[in-house]
Amino acid sequence: MAVWCAAMIPLGGCIFAFRDFDDDGSDGEPNSGKILVRMINASLSFGVDPELYATGQAVTNLNTDLFVDANKKGGFGDYGTGLLDPGQDAQIEIDCGAARVVGTRGGRFLKRSTGEVVATGQQRVVSQELQFDCGDVITITYEGKGPNEATTAIAVSRP
């Protein structure tokens, strides 16, 4: 198994990638044409809006090219709202052509009773052919520890 960390200079972040290799050094099964994004709300106290975005276009400015309403993914979570309850997880498949760049603004952690934002996680972004390939699984874990205390981690693996 190979593990590496790629620092994205504009983000100053680290993305951990895990990849299993066959005996011949190849990376296993052929591409499936999709990626699977798993979102895990590891907080037991707060709901989370994962703020998941994906685009099939090149990205030069995250705020104008990726983090725009047209690229926000939803249809998962409670009743398809795109929100995850405490301890809940969800997943979504995205066609590789529409997932050249995948990222989260960090997630908004919400008080269940009011919907008030109590914390935000860290922005994380991965790019196809740099940190992931078609057929890979991207797992984003959101953990809200308390008001203004939240972390967001992203990992890539091949099934």
Image (cartoon, rainbow, N blue to C red):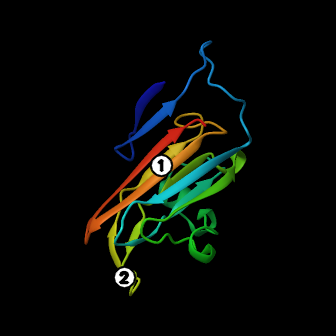
- Horizontal and vertical percent for residue 147? 25, 72
Residue where numbered disc 2 is placed: 116
Residue 9 % position (x, y): 38, 40
Q: Residue furthest top?
A: 24
Q: Say what amino acid the circle numbered 1 marks.
A: Val
The residue positioned 58% from the left and 43% from the top of the image is 137
| Viewer-nearest of discs 2 and 1 | 2
Which of the two residues, 8 or 149, is positioned nearer the viewer here?
149
- Residue holding disc 1: 125
Sequence-first disc among 2 and 1 = 2
Q: Residue 146 at what x, y percent from top left?
A: 25, 69
Q: Residues within 10 Å of mark 1 (few under 14, many from 20)?
A: many
For badge 2, the amino acid type reads Glu
Q: Give above or below for 155 relative to 4.
A: below
Q: Specify few, some or many for label 2: CA neighbours under 10 Å numbering under 14, 14-19, or 20 or more.
A: few
- Residue at 57 percent of width and 22 percent of height: 21
